[in-house]
């Protein structure tokens, strides 16, 4: 009985102690600092619009990565999948096979899905450790991107106007690309919280051994998760090419590292089972703010990279220290 | 002591040819031979010793880094910061040399930088054991490279090649054999012996398999991890010296992608990123498979992107090998 | 006689290189509790997994209500009304209790998970089981006993007609076990048939009407519990007779070796003091949550000490990590063998030599020949049931794994040996062997601390008994004065005090 | 097991056969010239290669094209070594570093391989096929900034990465020109930023320049990749009056160049000519037609080039002044390169 009361009371304080809350706090402090250093230029309508538009694809990728990390996997090939799917869509558009923007998006998503499926099969059926499987596939996907494009670009004038305009357009004052982020975000919440498959993903990451004997088909979960992640990377590929109105073989190389950093900052555990879409959204926004604002606040161009690395490191360390403090508090509160 | 059942336990391993053939290393040897046959038959230039050694020299800097990377992976850790470390160490070598005009000071500073960078990784990871090495070294990689960019700005540093002996570190040869190849071989033997024949090596295996059990067996897990990360840093600095001898000029984008390359070599060699598995011989063969395959495919002028696809496919095919092998074993067992 | 609700005939299951089950049979009548017994490695767990569809049998048939069935996976078995509670609790620590109960069969309407309905249903089930926690709690925060209760609630939520419990009492204290008996009997009275797997005879006597015995993957027989003697049953299980269960030799107790004073670890325990002498076996006992394991882990240096002093042979020592402790001569045989004691993927030889590798170094390198011979000797010394020292530790049964852990400790020069639940999950035959070894070690002059939850073991083996309750030492009993009742009273000291306090309070109101 | 091994070998063999089928046989007595680019995915470079290839065909020699994946100098060293091993007669290389290739190129020359550089020069090269003199490029860039600002105002430079040799030397030359002439005293160079030739980073940097400097009038991008991202960003920002100057490929920039567009005019030289000229220069070197400074050779379309002293290459030739693209001619040139 005592136990129950304790839990009810601590709901609110738990909310404050959650990783999301501490991250939000860090974000607000960061914004305030930047706002001050940039003489008030940062929190303007324009900069926020730019931020949401320019980092929309990173955020979308982070949601896909969330799923993969939840089941205890990792995917370092998403940058390559993005490039391959974005390039395929753009090439087909250039050659006139695709009549409208929707079909380009559809093709990119389909290609991404296929890439993800291959990875899922290798990981689930081939029993290959995810980081190795995606390391190998990354070479293949990136190589294919160059091969199908013959190392050429698809340039702005070869793209459909409707495709390019979509990325620049807005609805209800919010940029279309950010609408995609919002939609994926909500879809993720519903999917992970309210569908039984979503719960299976958490279960699979929380205790993969138990899953095997609880009637959940672990292989199926893995294959579907990697496929969804691939499809999301494909979506991001279309977002990227329509946003920048160009498709280049080397696009988004290294994006996976930013995305993983965003997830980890957002409280996703690399061991699986822990992490929420809200945390990931906040993590992605934090990374976007760091990348965007360093030059905005007038930091020397040559300092930026070092600072970015330092800030990511700091964010991760602070998170651990907060977590440790919470644990210690909890222990000290224990009656012996 | 206890009531004996008189049971005796065998202590000599039965060695069967079949087991030997089914080992990962055997597969690698086969691939290695196949790669060489293929290269030699498709390009008449492949077997020219001088050129062959030139090409080997080309991947040995990465190969050197793959040696401690094998240790890191064996421990169940990962280090994505080796590229940044080599870049920063090489930068420091150039800067110190140009400031003092003393190459020895430069080399000392370069090694010190490598050690410091590795120690930083080790310190963070052993003090904050709940952090994943992947994310920490990812951040330090950006940090190291960033520092190099800060130091060099839009310029570069160099001039070391004007010292004849320094340049020879990379370019010098005994007959057709480069000095660096000999250095690499010595390092490989030492690293291999330590990994397989010493207490330290066995302890690394134990940590990679099961950190808790290792600690309960009295192994100083965090001390060893700290040492291996620092060692990796030192080898990065050491490799950076040769790298400087090769390039003679350092910019802040050198050594990019060395991390994944070194990891690929180890993984192909059978050293799993999950820790505790694999042999050093495998890693060494894998270094040469990747390097020579690249060279052979380069000689027949395949484009870089095709080579990339071939290497990715090879990696996937080889890591699928155990699954396929078990599948066949099980089918036979059932019969 | 009733027609069996579940019947299995001629089941054979082969794993690569091993026959895990060889032509075994079993039948279960409606509304009965049927005990399944056998040594570790007899094939009980595999048998359960075959019933549940986790493994597919190579041969044999299974009849449910007289009709042949074949489950391809667990879900099909669950749909047919069979639920299993596995030996190692198979929960999801990051998820809530309710979700753990409903994993695999979440309440879903129009594709949407019905959280409210699930929490309500879960709370109802937990109330039925008189659980003291609610369904919103995180599984990871529960005790083992509470988690077990969640597993039972899960079986109930499936409306199972047949429930299989695999060693449910292994991790429970006596009181908790009794609570489990109550639930099991209640379920039986409601018409559920239960297959109950356990090592403990008391479980069998308290619950079962019939018992089936497996040995070495074979079916030995099925007996009425009332119609078979203890000795016959043991004989059936191990294939030989075991005369003396507690061969405690009389050892002259020598000078003090280890003494701890006022050990504290924030949030875990406080003011723990005791001493152990040469040749003495000190029993450390208490209920789950008494934090006995945490105390010895701290002494061993595996966890950080907040305050307190440790003396070894009269001198104060600082222990920061396990290797410090081992250098000083303190050895720990951890409770969780599979995770802390052994490297399962290694051969038993390498496991045995791991702690003292330096001994085998000649020149710069390990002399493998020497290592192999020594490890073989040590493994034989404790009579490990293995073919070769290259057998993987994971291929051994629990008891033999424990023997390997003991052999590992024998290879080092320890003065103090701490054995944490040395016979947990160990079958009867191996248990006797381990007691025998313990006795021998005491004779050789080791100071031994033995943690155990099993009353007979504590009473039978210890020279002195220290009882803990919720992080504090509540009493110390000599071998002579110790009885089951006294120990239990001390082990529950704080609970009793709390209950009295409550009484006083209500009285005042 | 045997089957498995056989299968693996067969797959490997098949792989190599396919590989072999694609590859041009490198030599067997034939004369082969090779061209090495900065990286695989740069359209400017591929135009240069096509010029080189056409010229090789006209000269009747075989041609190998090789590029590293990224602008890394390591990979270029590997590639040069591979080429030397195949006994190519000559290598034309767009160097990723001004010094790091020296030893490798020297070794190649010791083996009798003719080495020229194009696009980006490096130590160790015999001759640099200079697309346009550094000062010349810097001058037209400064002048277009001067013109677009109307003689006074703020401007910024968006470069590729801080390690891009060409860009760095042009920027340095621009500085010298502006500081050295009172005419440009009213131009205010507010900042140099690096877009790393990535779309996202270039876009960010462009946007940040707009935010930080509300009075900014011109952004000058001496990189064909950066200028594209910059122009696109400026065009997509409503009400932005900033003009974009720089070096760009007409085919990629078609949408943005014109009197009423974000980029009134921009400059570039013909990369096809640069590539072609490199092949003719090699031919002349191997024939011994050129040697001393002051000697001349003819390339495509009877164009005559005079050898000058080079730095850091031994010698250099300059292909031509930068060419201006504007609204009138952009559509025509877009089909060419």
Image (cartoon, coloured by chain):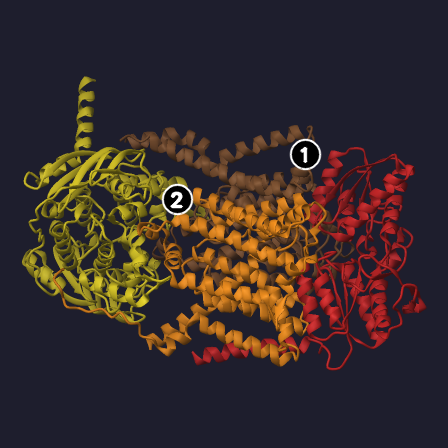
* Rendering quarter of residue B288: bottom right
Q: Which chain is red in the picture?
A: D
Vertical placement of residue C120 versus B319, above or below: above
**Label 2: few (<14), some or many (≥20) within 10 Å?**
some
* Rendering quarter of residue C219: bottom left
Report whether D144 appears left or right of C438.
right
Question: Can the viewer see residue C290?
Answer: no
Rendered residue at 10%/41% (across/down): C484
The image quadrant where one finds the N terminus of chain D is: bottom left
Residue A23 versus residue C409: which sits nearer the camera?
Answer: C409
Report whether C393 appears left or right of C244.
right
**Label 1: few (<14), some or many (≥20) within 10 Å?**
many
SS under mark 1 = loop
Q: How many marks?
A: 2
Q: Which chain is orange in the picture?
A: B
Q: Which residue is mark 1?
A: A297
Vertical placement of residue C158 versus C55, above or below: above
Q: Position of residue A89 (x, y in %)?
A: 67, 58
Report whether A28 appears left or right of D272.
left
Disc 1 chain ID = A
Q: Position of residue C264 (x, y in %)?
A: 28, 33
Q: Position of residue A94 (x, y in %)?
A: 74, 60
* Rendering quarter of residue D78: bottom right
Q: Which residue is mark 2?
A: C94
Residue D154 versus residue A103: which sits nearer the camera?
Answer: D154
Disc 2 chain ID = C
Rendered residue at 53%/38% (across/down): A314
Q: Which chain is yellow in the picture?
A: C
The image quadrant where one finds the C terminus of chain D is: bottom right
In this structure image, what is the colour of chain A? brown
Q: Given the current orientation, which residue lies at the most extreme top position? A: C508
């Amino acid at each position: 009985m005592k136990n129950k009361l304790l839990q009810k009371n601590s709901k609110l304080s738990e909310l404050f102690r959650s990783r999301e809350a501490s991250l939000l706090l860090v974000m607000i402090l960061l914004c305030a600092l930047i706002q001050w250093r940039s003489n008030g230029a940062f929190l303007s309508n324009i900069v926020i619009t730019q931020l949401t538009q320019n980092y929309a694809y990173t955020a979308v990728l982070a949601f896909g990565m969330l799923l993969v990390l939840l089941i205890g996997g990792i995917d370092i090939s998403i940058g390559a999948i993005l490039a391959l799917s974005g390039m395929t869509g753009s090439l087909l558009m250039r050659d006139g096979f695709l009549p409208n923007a929707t079909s380009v998006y559809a093709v990119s998503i389909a290609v991404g899905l296929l890439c993800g499926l291959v990875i899922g099969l290798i990981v689930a059926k081939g029993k290959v450790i995810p980081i190795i499987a995606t390391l190998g596939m990354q070479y293949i996907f990136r190589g294919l991107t160059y091969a199908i494009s013959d190392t050429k670009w698809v340039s702005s004038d070869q793209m459909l106007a409707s495709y390019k305009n979509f990325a620049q357009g807005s609805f209800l004052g919010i940029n279309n690309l950010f609408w995609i982020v919002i939609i994926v975000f909500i879809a993720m919440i519903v999917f992970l919280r309210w569908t039984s498959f979503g719960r299976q993903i958490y279960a699979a990451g929380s205790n993969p051994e138990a899953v095997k004997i609880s009637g959940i088909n672990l292989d199926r979960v893995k294959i579907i998760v990697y496929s969804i992640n691939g499809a999301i990377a494909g979506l991001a590929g279309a977002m990227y090419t329509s946003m920048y109105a160009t498709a280049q073989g080397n696009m988004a190389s290294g994006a996976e590292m930013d995305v993983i950093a965003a997830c980890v900052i957002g409280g996703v555990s690399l061991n699986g089972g822990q992490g929420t879409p809200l945390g990931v959204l906040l993590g992605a926004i934090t990374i976007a703010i760091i990348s965007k604002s360093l030059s905005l606040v007038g930091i020397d161009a040559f300092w930026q990279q070092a600072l970015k690395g330092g800030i990511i490191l700091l964010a991760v360390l602070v998170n651990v220290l907060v977590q440790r403090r919470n644990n210690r508090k909890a222990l000290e509160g224990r009656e012996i | 002591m206890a009531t004996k059942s008189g049971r005796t336990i065998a202590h000599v391993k039965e060695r069967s040819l079949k087991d030997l053939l089914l080992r990962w290393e055997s597969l690698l040897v086969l691939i290695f031979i196949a790669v060489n046959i293929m290269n030699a038959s498709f390009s008449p230039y492949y077997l020219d010793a001088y050129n062959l050694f030139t090409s080997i020299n080309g991947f040995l800097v990465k190969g050197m880094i793959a040696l401690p990377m094998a240790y890191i992976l064996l421990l169940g850790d990962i280090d994505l910061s080796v590229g940044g470390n080599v870049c920063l160490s090489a930068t420091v070598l150039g800067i110190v040399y140009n400031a003092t005009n003393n190459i020895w000071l430069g080399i000392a500073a370069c090694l010190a930088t490598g050690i410091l960078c590795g120690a930083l990784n080790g310190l963070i990871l052993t003090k904050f054991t709940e952090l994943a090495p992947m994310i920490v070294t990812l951040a330090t990689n950006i940090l190291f490279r960033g520092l190099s960019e800060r130091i060099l700005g839009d310029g570069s540093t160099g001039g070391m090649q004007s010292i004849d002996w320094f340049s020879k570190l990379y370019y010098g040869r005994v007959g057709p054999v480069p000095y660096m190849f000999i250095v690499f071989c010595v390092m490989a033997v030492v690293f291999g012996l330590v990994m397989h024949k010493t207490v330290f090596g066995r302890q690394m295996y134990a940590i990679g398999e099961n950190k808790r059990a290792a600690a309960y067996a009295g192994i100083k897990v965090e001390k060893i991890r700290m040492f291996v990360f620092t060692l990796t840093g030192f080898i990065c600095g050491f490799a950076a010296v040769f790298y400087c001898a090769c390039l003679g000029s350092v910019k802040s984008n050198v050594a990019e992608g060395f991390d994944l390359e070194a990891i690929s070599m180890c993984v192909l060699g059978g050293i799993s990123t999950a820790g505790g598995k694999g042999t050093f011989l495998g890693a060494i063969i894998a270094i040469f498979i990747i390097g020579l395959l690249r060279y052979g495919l380069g000689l027949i002028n395949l484009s870089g992107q095709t080579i990339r696809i071939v290497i990715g496919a090879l990696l996937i095919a080889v890591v699928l090998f155990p699954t396929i092998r078990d599948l066949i074993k099980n089918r036979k067992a059932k019969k | 006689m009733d027609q069996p609700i579940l019947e299995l005939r001629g089941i054979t299951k082969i794993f690569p290189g091993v026959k895990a089950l060889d032509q075994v049979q079993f039948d279960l009548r409606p509304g009965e509790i049927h005990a399944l017994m056998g040594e570790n490695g007899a094939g009980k767990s595999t048998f359960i997994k075959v019933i549940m569809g986790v493994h597919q049998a190579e041969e044999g048939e299974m009849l449910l209500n007289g009709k042949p069935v074949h489950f391809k996976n667990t879900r099909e078995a669950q749909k047919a009304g069979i639920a299993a509670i596995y030996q190692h609790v198979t929960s999801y620590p990051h998820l809530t209790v309710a979700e753990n109960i409903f994993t695999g069969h979440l309440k879903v309407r129009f594709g949407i998970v019905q959280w409210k309905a699930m929490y309500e249903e879960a709370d109802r089930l937990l109330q039925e089981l008189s659980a003291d926690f609610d369904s919103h709690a995180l599984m990871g925060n529960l005790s083992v006993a509470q988690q077990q209760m969640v597993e039972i609630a899960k079986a109930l939520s499936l409306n199972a007609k047949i429930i299989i419990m695999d060693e449910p009492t292994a991790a429970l204290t006596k009181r908790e076990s009794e609570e489990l008996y109550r639930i099991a009997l209640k379920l039986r009275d409601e018409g559920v048939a239960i297959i109950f797997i356990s090592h403990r005879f008391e479980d069998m006597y308290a619950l079962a009407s019939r018992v089936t015995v497996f040995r070495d993957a074979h079916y030995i027989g099925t007996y009425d519990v009332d119609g078979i003697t203890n000795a016959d049953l043991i004989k059936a299980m191990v294939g030989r007779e075991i005369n003396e269960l507690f061969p405690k030799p009389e050892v002259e107790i020598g000078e003090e070796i280890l003494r701890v004073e006022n050990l504290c670890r924030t949030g875990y325990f406080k003011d723990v003091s005791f001493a152990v002498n040469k040749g003495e076996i000190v029993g450390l006992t208490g209920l789950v949550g008494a934090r006995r394991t945490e105390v010895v882990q701290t002494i061993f240096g595996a966890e950080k000490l907040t305050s307190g002093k440790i003396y070894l042979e009269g001198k104060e020592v600082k222990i920061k990590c396990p290797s410090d402790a081992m250098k000083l001569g303190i050895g720990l045989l951890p409770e969780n063998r599979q995770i802390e004691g052994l490297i399962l993927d290694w051969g038993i030889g390498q496991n045995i030599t791991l702690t003292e590798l330096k001994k085998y170094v000649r020149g710069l390198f390990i002399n493998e020949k020497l290592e192999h011979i020594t490890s073989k000797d040590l493994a034989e010394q404790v009579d490990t049931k293995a073919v070769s020292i290259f057998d993987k530790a994971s291929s051994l049964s629990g008891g033999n794994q424990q023997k390997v852990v003991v052999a590992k400790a024998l290879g080092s020069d320890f003065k103090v040996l701490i054995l944490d639940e040395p016979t947990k999950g160990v079958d009867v035959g191996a248990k006797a062997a381990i007691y025998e070894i313990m006795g021998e070690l005491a004779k050789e002059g080791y100071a031994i601390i033995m943690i155990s939850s099993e009353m007979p073991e504590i009473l039978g083996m210890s020279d002195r008994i220290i009882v803990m309750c919720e992080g504090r030492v509540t009493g110390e009993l000599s071998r002579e004065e110790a009885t089951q009742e006294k120990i239990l009273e001390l082990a529950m000291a704080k609970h009793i005090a709390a209950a009295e306090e409550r009484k006083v309070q209500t009285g005042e109101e | 097991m045997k089957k498995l091994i056989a299968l693996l070998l067969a797959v490997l063999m098949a792989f190599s056969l396919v590989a072999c089928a694609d590859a041009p046989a490198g030599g067997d007595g034939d004369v082969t010239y090779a061209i090495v680019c900065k990286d695989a995915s740069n359209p400017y470079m591929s135009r240069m290669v096509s010029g080189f290839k056409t010229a090789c065909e006209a000269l009747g020699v075989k041609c190998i094209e090789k590029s590293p994946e990224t602008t890394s100098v390591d990979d270029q060293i590997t590639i040069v070594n591979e080429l030397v091993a195949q006994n190519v007669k000559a290598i034309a290389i767009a160097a990723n570093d001004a010094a790091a290739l020296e030893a490798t190129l020297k070794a190649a020359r010791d083996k009798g391989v003719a080495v020229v550089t194009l696009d980006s020069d490096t130590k160790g090269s015999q001759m640099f096929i200079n697309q346009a003199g550094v000062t010349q490029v810097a001058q037209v860039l400064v002048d277009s900034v001067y013109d677009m600002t109307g003689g006074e105002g703020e401007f910024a430079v968006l470069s590729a990465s801080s390690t891009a040799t060409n860009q760095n030397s042009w920027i340095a030359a621009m500085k010298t020109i502006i500081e050295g002439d009172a005419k440009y005293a009213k131009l205010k160079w507010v900042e140099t930023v690096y877009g790393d030739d990535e779309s996202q980073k270039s876009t960010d940097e462009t946007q940040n320049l707009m935010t930080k400097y509300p009075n900014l009038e011109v952004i000058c991008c001496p990189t064909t990749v950066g200028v594209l991202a910059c122009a696109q960003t400026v065009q997509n920002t409503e009400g932005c009056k900033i003009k974009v100057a720089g070096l760009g490929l007409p085919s990629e920039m078609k949408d943005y160049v014109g009197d009423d567009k974000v980029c009134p005019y921009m400059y570039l030289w013909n990369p096809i000519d640069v590539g072609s000229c490199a092949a003719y220069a090699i031919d002349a070197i191997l024939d011994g037609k050129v040697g001393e400074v002051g000697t001349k050779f003819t390339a495509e379309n009877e164009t005559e080039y005079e050898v000058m002293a080079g730095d850091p290459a031994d010698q250099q030739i300059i292909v031509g002044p930068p060419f201006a693209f504007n609204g009138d001619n952009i559509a025509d040139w877009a089909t060419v390169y």
